[in-house]
Amino acid sequence: MREVVLVSDADSIDSRLAARLAELRGERGWSLDELAERSGVSRSTLSRLERAEISPTAALLGRLCSVYGRTMSRLLMEVEEEPPGLVRAARQAVWRDEEAGFVRRAVSPPHAGLRGEVIEGLLEPGAEVPYDRPPVPGLEHHVWVLAGGPLELRVGDDEHVLEPGDCLRFRLRGASRYRCPGPEPVRYAVVVVLP
């Protein structure tokens, strides 16, 4: 079961996310067929997503963010109210993809006037989250493993194994994949900076 939990109830967030995705497609004048071609996501899935009949997986949101040139945090922020400067832990947006074994916390939500954000990720043993392209080419990432793991991170053709305390810095220009081989869940922080 997938779940989106932000400061308000999940149904409301799903509805606002669906409406925002439909709005982004409309702003570009794209049909569902054209968006399906650009994103590699089926027309029927996109239609159900825009009607809030389904909740997106991390991989699906990643594909759509890539097409729309947004980070996932920025898209989720667009369906929330203006974030305050101080975000208490209890009010940080948490998004769960239970099917994939992935939990994502927006530690410092993006803001229209700022270029950076901090995200916390948690992957269960055996969990894998692939992204076939970056949401914004050249997006700067700093991935810091906080606990557990290890974290296997593929950036383009390069494979990295990160242990607690390790930090990897890169510019994302192609496909990537986050994977936790186990035996423990891995918790990590990602600092994302727009180019």
Image: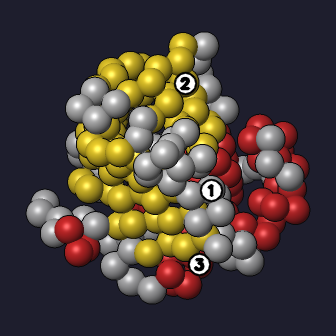
Query: How dense is the environment of label 3, judged by Cα within 10 Å: few (below 14), some, or many (20 and up)?
Result: some
Q: Which residue is mark 1?
A: 100
Residue 46 image offset from top left, x and y in percent? 78, 60
What number is the disc on residue 154? 2
Position of residue 125 relative to residue 9, above or below, is above
Query: How dense is the environment of label 2, judged by Cα within 10 Å: few (below 14), some, or many (20 and up)?
Result: some
Q: Which quadrant of the rendered structure holds the N terminus?
A: bottom right
Position of residue 146 relative to residue 83, above or below, is above
C-alpha gap between disc 2 and disc 1? 17 Å
Q: What amino acid type is highlighted by mark number 1?
A: Ala
Residue displayed at 50% across by 28% down: 153
Q: Are marks 3 and 1 in contact (CB under 8 Å)?
A: no
Q: What amino acid type is highlighted by mark number 3?
A: Ser
What number is the disc on residue 4? none
Query: How dense is the environment of label 1, judged by Cα within 10 Å: few (below 14), some, or many (20 and up)?
Result: some
Q: Earlier in the sequence, mark 2 or mark 1?
A: 1
Q: Earlier in the sequence, mark 3 or mark 2?
A: 3
Q: Which quadrant of the rendered structure holds the C terminus?
A: top left
The local secondary structure at tag 2 comes to: strand
Position of residue 165 relative to residue 62, above or below, is above
- In front of the other: label 3 or label 1? 1
Residue 135 visible in the displayed image: no
Pick the front one: 17 or 186: 186
Residue displayed at 56% across by 58% down: 101
The local secondary structure at tag 1 comes to: loop
Q: Which residue is mark 3?
A: 15
- In front of the other: label 3 or label 2? 2
Residue displayed at 67% across by 51% down: 60
Residue 64 image offset from top left, x and y in percent? 64, 47
